[in-house]
């Protein structure tokens, strides 16, 4: 087969032209980032979290709500994780100043217990979903915590995998899932994929296989029986921090979410989440459990094969070909999203 190389003209000028959001350890694309497992933050506890190189504290008040603040006290910079939760507020260990969930200083003991309106630590929006605590990097959320499009608005069951690390930026990890060529070269799958990108919103890109199942082999003909149209393999990307793959036969779609965040030096800390629609009754719960276990297995299979690439790659798409068009679309889509100077503690 002759490779078509007309896409070379589309080579992105990564940092300048694309807005600098893609694969840039110095900037963080605005969006939801996983911070902690919900069960790691019981009521009345505070935890230090380094999120994408920025030091935060997460605490859960007596009302059960998780909150996120910048880690260092507005008085003299003590780390607030050394303090303690009081009611729904957090008290600094050092001189006992007390902050509410919005980061306002509501009590200074040495000022007779008065609040100090000039003292404030930055607070970040928080959500809890799928057994994780998520922090919105940005002023206020412009979208809910992502869900697979097929599960939007319906009750879901989630199963968390073990947290994992990869040796490259999350955006490069996400590129992998829409890299048509590597499904054959790395994963040795006997299928041909043609990934078609489509923006669902300014922060959400869907990339879906549109190639029909090949029927030129015994396996292909059996596989084709499971699909009325193209083989289902669809990725949905949100904020460059969450990728959700939907795959499986028409009658039994599996959904696997990858929540990713960069480290200060541009590696990935990730969390895989198997998701399914919650089915009613005892039998439904059993089906849910089996399906989630199978989904987690599929995720592990794919993650293993790519590790050698993730740990050694210096991503630079110098020579794109037609088969890389979904990757280019992802890079452009991310480049158009707002970014923050985050890791350096910018306000
Ligand atoms: S450093 Fe926190 S109260 Fe002084
Ligand atoms: Fe892969």
Image: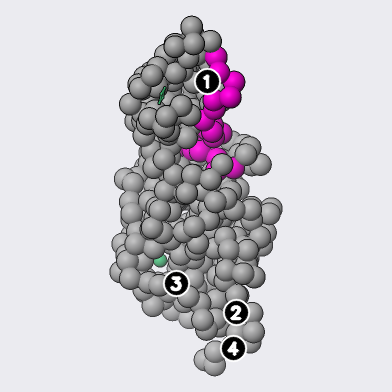
Label 4 within 8 A of ligand 2 by Cβ? no
Q: Nearer the viewer, mark 1 or mark 3?
A: 1
Location of mark 1 (residue) = 105
Q: Is residue 121 a member of the stretch shown in magenta?
A: yes
Which image quarter holds the C terminus? top right
State the CA–CA distance, disc 1 to disc 3.
Answer: 44 Å
Report the magenta stretch's main SS: strand
Q: Position of residue 264 (x, y in %)?
A: 40, 53
x 66%, y 60%: residue: 336
State the CA–CA distance, disc 1 to disc 4.
Answer: 61 Å
State the CA–CA distance, disc 1 to disc 2.
Answer: 50 Å
The disc, 1 or 4, on the residue closer to the chain's N-terminal end is 4
> In the image, is 224 to the left or to the right of 82?
right
x 54%, y 89%: residue: 3
Q: Nearer the viewer, mark 3 or mark 4?
A: 3
Q: Is residue 228 a member of the stretch shown in magenta?
A: no
Label 2 within 8 A of ligand 2 by Cβ? no
Q: Can residue 229 be seen in this view?
A: no
């Amino acid at each position: 087969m002759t490779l078509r190389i007309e896409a070379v003209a589309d080579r992105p000028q990564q940092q300048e032209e694309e807005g600098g959001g893609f694969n840039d350890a110095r900037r963080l694309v605005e969006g939801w980032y996983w911070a902690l497992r919900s069960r790691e933050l019981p009521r009345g506890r505070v935890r230090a979290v380094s999120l994408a190189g920025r030091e935060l504290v997460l605490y859960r008040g007596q009302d059960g709500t998780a909150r996120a603040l910048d880690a260092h006290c507005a008085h003299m910079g003590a780390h607030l994780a050394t303090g303690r939760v009081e009611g729904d507020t957090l008290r600094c260990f050092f001189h006992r100043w007390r902050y509410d969930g919005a980061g306002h200083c509501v009590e200074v003991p040495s000022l007779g217990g008065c609040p100090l309106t000039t003292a404030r630590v930055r607070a970040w929006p928080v959500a809890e979903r799928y057994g994780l605590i998520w922090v919105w990097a940005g002023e206020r959320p412009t979208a809910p915590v992502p869900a697979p499009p097929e599960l939007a608005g319906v009750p879901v069951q989630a199963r968390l995998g073990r947290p994992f690390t990869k040796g490259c930026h999350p955006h490069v990890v996400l590129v992998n899932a829409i890299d048509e060529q590597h499904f054959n070269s790395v994963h040795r799958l006997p299928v041909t994929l043609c990934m078609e990108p489509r923006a669902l919103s300014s922060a959400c890109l869907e990339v879906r296989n549109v190639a029909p199942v090949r029927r030129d082999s015994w396996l292909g003909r059996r596989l084709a029986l499971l699909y009325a149209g193209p083989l289902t393999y669809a990725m949905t990307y949100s904020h460059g921090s969450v990728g959700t793959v939907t795959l499986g036969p028409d009658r039994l779609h599996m959904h696997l979410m990858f929540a990713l965040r960069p480290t200060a030096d541009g590696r990935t800390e990730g969390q895989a989440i198997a998701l399914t629609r919650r089915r009613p009754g005892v039998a439904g719960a059993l089906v849910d459990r089996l399906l989630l276990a199978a989904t987690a297995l599929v995720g592990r299979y794919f993650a293993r094969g790519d590790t050698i690439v993730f740990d050694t790659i210096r991503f630079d798409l110098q020579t794109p070909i037609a088969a890389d068009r979904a990757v280019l679309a992802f890079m452009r889509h991310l480049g158009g999203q707002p970014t923050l100077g985050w890791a350096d503690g910018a306000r």
